[in-house]
Amino acid sequence: MPDPERPSPAELLHLRGRTLEKGEPVAPPLTLASMFHLPGDPAGFASYGRSDNPTWEATEKMLGHLEGAGAVLFPSGMAAIAAPFLAFLSAGDRVLLPSDGYYTTRLLADRILARLGVTFDRRPTAGFAEGGFAGYRLVFVESPSNPGLELCDIADVAAGVRAAGGLTVVDNTTMTPFGQRPLDLGADIVVASDTKAPGGHSDILMGHVASRDPGIVAAVKEWRKLSGSIPGPFEAWLLHRSLETLELRFDRMCRTAGIVAERLAAHPAVRGGRYPGLPADPAHNLAARQMLRPGFLIGLTLASGAAADAFIAACRFLRPATSFGGVHSSAERRDRWGDAVAPGFVRLAIGCEPAEELWAALDEALSAAG
Ligand SMILES: Cc1ncc(COP(=O)(O)O)c(C=O)c1O
């Protein structure tokens, strides 16, 4: 029996097939359309390419199944993150952000939204609930945070925010719905970059917003239509294709990450690390409670920035790249963007290479880098 708390990967693969008429293609067609044939009363019909597209809808159906919610597709993770801010905030509202999450979210707040009269406070993800949530219209959570992989108790935060009359928005990019289900934990809204593991091949940008509140879904759709922040149908089609293998890829990535993280923790070149799946990780107990899988990102600290650069350059199975979640493992020294991490901190994103081949390459490169 499928677990109601978890999306069924088998159902996901047959969502479209079960709706087909005889002779229709099993794979969804890519529909490129700005105009729709629309004589007479337009109500209830696809009308214009900024509000309707059957390829988006096919992909949103899959994302909706994964989230157990209504899903609205956006052309990038940042477009998805911006949507609830711009759909729900007014001048005078206060918002709480993580101080150690994805930095572009903070830049959006500081450079754009603060000008519109919204006030932003920041707190570290570990201990996010300390200080309470009174007075916040919206509380934005990222757990595990990118890049530090800190966690906060999403259920606890969501309950506190709800009691204080605010909305909880969780950026679930680092986990995907196969790894963590913030809406099950009480969040009002999930936002995610599908550029990462859901896209999975490092060739598209895409994002989505999901909520179980139909009023929220309608307001986010209206924001998308009025702002024109719409995904391209081809990218939506590629994401549809990628979602069909997300469970397979995510499973491989998490399994390999578990093996690699354990070995890294024992490696003489490694000075420190974070991986919520390791029992020694400070957030392990919380991770075991609220995450379905420990994920594919590993935080790894080497002796210096130079050692980290040398490690990344020496490893034949690591792409030196920003971003993560592709089939090819990648790594980045996050200090190069000014993140508040040690100079030798590397965000390692495990891909789909077989674990032993990847480990041999990582081990060799770590030894070479000293
Ligand atoms: C946690 C997190 N949220 C959001 C984003 C933004 O996604 P996109 O680049 O698709 O706009 C990223 C990108 O790295 C991210 O890591």
Image (cartoon, rainbow, N blue to C red):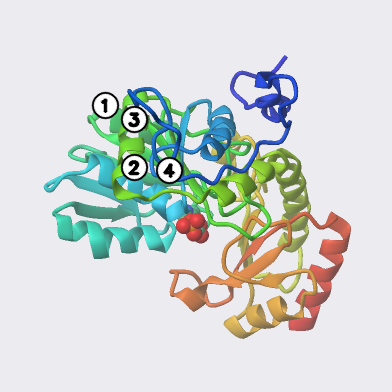
On the image, the x and y values in percent for residue 131 come to 26, 44
Judging from the image, what secondary structure is the residue with disc 1 in?
helix
Three-letter residue code for mark 1: Ala
**First in residue order: circle 3 vs circle 4:** 4
Name the residue that disc number 2 marks: 225
Name which residue lies at 59% across and 57% down: 204
Residue 107 is situated, as x and y percent measured from the top left of the image, at: 33, 64
Q: Which quadrant is home to the C terminus?
A: bottom right
Name which residue lies at 24% across and 61% down. Answer: 112
The kind of residue on which mark 4 rests is: Gly
Residue type at the position of mark 3: Ala
Helix, strand or loop status at disc 4: loop
Circle 3 Cα neighbour tier, 10 Å, few/some/many (<14 / 14–19 / ≥20): some
The part of the image, by quadrant, that contains residue 288 is top right
**Lateral position of residue 250 relative to residue 364, left or right:** left
Residue that appears at 24% across and 53% down: 121
Taking the image as drawn, is residue 207 in sight? Answer: yes
* C-alpha separation, residue under disc 4 versus residue under disc 1: 40 Å
Residue at 61% x, 18% y is 4
Q: CA distance from mark 2 to mark 1?
A: 32 Å
Residue depth check, mark 3 versus mark 1: number of the one nearer the observer: 3
Circles 3 and 4: CB distance less than 8 Å? no
Give neighbour class at mark 4: few <14, some 14-19, many 20+ (Cα, 10 Å).
Answer: some
Comparing 85 with 252, the one in front is 85
Question: Is ligand 1 less than 8 Å from the beta carbon at label 1?
Answer: no
Mark 3 or 4: the one toward you = 4
